[in-house]
Image (cartoon, rainbow, N blue to C red):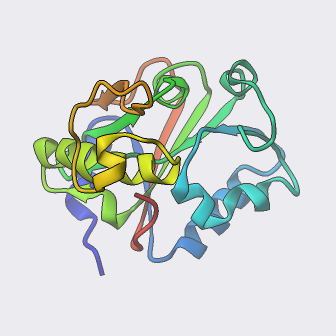
Amino acid sequence: MTDFTKVRANLEERGFQVSCFASAQEAADYLDAKLDGKTVACGGSVTLKELGLLKRLAAHATVLSQRSGASFAEAAAAPVYLSSVNGLAETGELINIDGTGNRVASTIFGHEEVYFVIGRNKLAPDYDAALWRARNIASPKNAQRLGKKTPCAVKGDKCYDCKSPERICRALTVLWEKPKGIGRSEVVLIDEDLGY
């Protein structure tokens, strides 16, 4: 069992609310109940897909996503935003890399509530390790998943800081503290490997 004590304390000190769950099922049940009847948006997230959360929410909430045909502007106006991260440092920094910018922008500003749903595999001991993880593990896997023809997708081993027109690493955010522009910012930690 993963010990989330240190990262939880560091996240709370930085202004985030934190919930911890032993399984993806428990986390999905929690979020499904919490978001009942709300309008929820999300960007691309393998973690959320693996949770099956968006399908569950669609039965009793409004879900705005690329899959549902929502525009970036519609998603940006939703009161609630769901995301994961590409790396989470035990010291409390949340790191995301994005191609379009809609996902990283939505974790910083514009929503009443933001939930970061994070599996234990995203956890790294410190900021440098979390950044390395985001660039060299999560990004190549996401480029492969999206069928991009970038060096990282072809070789699948690391970031090459390429200049490819298909590059998906175009924006990087580091949340050192809970952003002031968001009412509730909750990190949902799950003791299972989820997403990249």
Q: Quadrant of residue 169?
A: top left
Front residue of 112 and 43: 43
Question: Where does the image place residue 81, in percent across and percent down from the top left?
Answer: 61, 36
User: Where residue 107 sits in the image (x, y, percent)?
Assistant: 48, 30
Quick check: 177 left or right of 161? right
Residue found farthest to the right: 59
Q: Quadrant of the C terminus?
A: bottom left
Residue at x 78%, y 62% (from the top left corner)? 56
Vertical order, 75 against 43 (above or below): above
196 is higher (above) or lower (below) than 62:
below
Q: Position of residue 29 (x, y in %)?
A: 66, 68
Q: Is 150 in front, or is 183?
A: 150
- Please say if 176 is above or below 125: above
Q: What residue sits 21% from the left and 49% below the top?
A: 158
Residue 153 % position (x, y)? 36, 49
Furthest residue toward bottom: 1
At 80% from the left and 41% from the top, the residue drawn is 68
* Residue 101 shows up from this direction: yes
Specify whether 58 is left or right of 94. right
At a point 42% along the width and 41% down the height, the residue shown is: 149
Total count of labels: 0
Left or right, 130 with reference to 53? left
Q: Quadrant of the N terminus?
A: bottom left
- The answer to whether residue 8 is seen in the rendering is no
